Image (cartoon, rainbow, N blue to C red):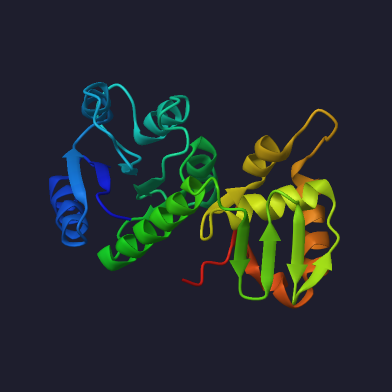
Amino acid sequence: MKNTHILVVEDEQDIRDLISFQMKSEGHQVTAVESADKAVSVLERGEKIDLFIIDWMLPGSMNGLEFTKKLRSHKSYMSSPVIMITALTQPDNIVSGLDAGADDYITKPFDLTVLQARVRVQLRGLELSQKTAEDKLIFGNLLIEVSKCRVLVQKEEVTLTSTEFKILLLLAQKPGHVFTRDQFISNIQGDNVFVTGRTIDTHIAGLRKKLGEEANVIETIRGIGYRFKDES
């Protein structure tokens, strides 16, 4: 994705400088600040940000988790990729970060090349989501025809329930992105559909069974949720 503008929010200067250098070396425009308060000032200036890299533990009036929630409530950034970085490594912390709106979560210390790879994954997902006119998603022998709500495996149509199709489409539109059960619920809940965390697992199991040889495209992230395999 060309001309990408990344906002790095990290209070440790050494880490902030390293991330900025690495992102610039990939050809991205980078704005780096040490607090969420300064990040808000950047947004208030009207600068267009394509991707956010946010540390959880930040000084000032709000931490990274609170800033991420603020982004998700803003119409201009509710869908912008957010990568959260933090020293908090427990599954509950990761779930909290993802539920707050982060698309990915990297724990310190981390390898900068891994961060670069995670950024590439998020930008590919962003490009895919921006292709609103794209009607077909193709992953090897798996074909999803979006407008027709139709799925084919090995050129054979697979009959899915409405909820199974919504789950598959949500995953397939953002390969590599980890979705928690709560995120599935908020995205697929409808007027006539009641979904719980437990039923999400049941729907995933049924979906995998129907996908047959392509079932491994849906990966389980233990204690957190599910993601669509990113093979690019």
Q: Nearer the viewer, residue 64 or 146?
A: 146
Q: Nearer the viewer, residue 201 or 172?
A: 172
Examine the rendering and report whether any part of residue 222 can be seen: no
Q: Residue at x 72, y 71 (%)?
A: 215
How many badges with numbers are in the image? 0
Image coordinates of residue 190 in percent, x first then y, are: 77, 32
Q: Quadrant of residue 188?
A: top right
Q: Residue at x 53, y 59 (%)?
A: 175
Q: Residue at x 64, y 69 (%)?
A: 217
Q: Residue at x 83, y 65 (%)?
A: 158
Q: Quadrant of the N terminus?
A: bottom left
Image coordinates of residue 6 in percent, x first then y, are: 26, 45
Image coordinates of residue 37 in percent, x first then y, are: 25, 24
Q: Up-down: is 225 above or below 39?
A: below
Image coordinates of residue 159 in percent, x first then y, are: 86, 60
Q: Up-down: is 37 above or below 171?
A: above
Q: Quadrant of residue 145?
A: bottom right
- Left or right: residue 97 compared with residue 54: right
- Left or right: residue 174 compared with residue 71: right
Q: Nearer the viewer, residue 53 or 131?
A: 131
Examine the rendering and report whether any part of residue 121 can be seen: yes
Q: Quadrant of residue 44?
A: top left
